[in-house]
Image (cartoon, helix red, strand yellow):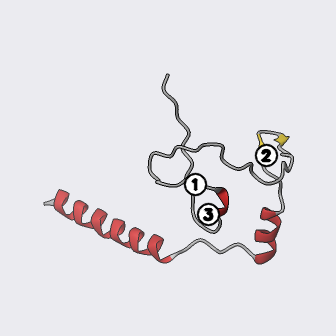
C-alpha cells in the first residue's frame, strides 16, 4: 500500500516537473549579440581561417552528362539549389 502512494507521489512530481520545464523557454539572443556572433570569422580550433577569394567558379569542362541531354553550364544553374557530387571509378 505504501509503495503505491510513493509511486503516485513520484508520478505527480514528475508531471509537475515536466509541465514547468515545458513552459519555460530559452531566452532569445539580443540583436546586438546576434550581430556580434555573425561578425566573428570562422575558426578551426584556436586558428582563424582566412580563405582567399578566388573569384567566380570556372565553367564545367564536361560535354557528356548522364542525366541531361544537353551540356550543363553554371549560368543555367544561377538562382537554383545545386548539389555537386564528385565521384570516380577506382
Residue position for label 2:
43
Q: Quadrant of the N terminus?
A: bottom left
> In the figure, is residue 11 to the left or right of 75?
left
Image coordinates of residue 59 in percent, x first then y, are 70, 50
**Which residue is at the front of the view, 28 or 70?**
70
Displayed quadrant of residue 7: bottom left
Check whether the beta carbons of the residues at disc 1 and disc 2 lie within 8 A of each other.
no
Residue at (76%, 41%) from the top-left corner? 44
Q: CA distance from mark 1 to mark 2?
A: 35 Å
Mark 1 is surrounded, within 10 Å at the Cα level, by few (under 14), some (14 to 19) or many (20 or more) other residues, namely some
Q: Secondary structure at mark 3?
A: helix
Q: Which mark is residue 64?
A: none
**Where residue 81 sits in the image (x, y, percent)?**
57, 63
In space, the residues marked 2 and 3 are separated at their CA atoms by 34 Å
Distance between the Cα atoms at labels 1 and 3?
7 Å
Q: Between tags 1 and 2, which lies in front?
A: 1
Rendered position, 9 above or below 82: below
Q: Do the CB atoms of the residues marked 1 and 3 lie less than 8 Å apart?
A: yes
* Helix, strand or loop status at disc 2: strand
| Residue at the (81%, 74%) spot, across then down | 32
Direction from residue 61 to residue 30 in the image, left or right: right
Mark sitting earlier along the chain (2/3) = 2
Judge depth for marks 2 and 3 and give the one in front.
3
| Residue 72 tag number | 1
Which sits in the foreground, 36 or 76?
76
**Residue 67 location in percent, x, y?**
44, 50
For residue 8, above or below residue 90: below
Residue 86, located in which quarter of the rendered image? top right
Q: Position of residue 40 (x, y in %)?
A: 83, 57
Give the labeled residue for mark 3: 76
Disc 2 + disc 3, Cβ < 8 Å:
no
Foreground residue, 39 or 15? 39
Amino acid at each position: 500500500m505504501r509503495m503505491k502512494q510513493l509511486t503516485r507521489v513520484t508520478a505527480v512530481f514528475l508531471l509537475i516537473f515536466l509541465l514547468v520545464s515545458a513552459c519555460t523557454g530559452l531566452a532569445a539572443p539580443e540583436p546586438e549579440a546576434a550581430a556580434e556572433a555573425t561578425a566573428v570569422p570562422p575558426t578551426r580550433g584556436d586558428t582563424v581561417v582566412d580563405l582567399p577569394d578566388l573569384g567566380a567558379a570556372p565553367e564545367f569542362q564536361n560535354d557528356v552528362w548522364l542525366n541531361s541531354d544537353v551540356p550543363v553550364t553554371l549560368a543555367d544553374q544561377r538562382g537554383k539549389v545545386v548539389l555537386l557530387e564528385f565521384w570516380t571509378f577506382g
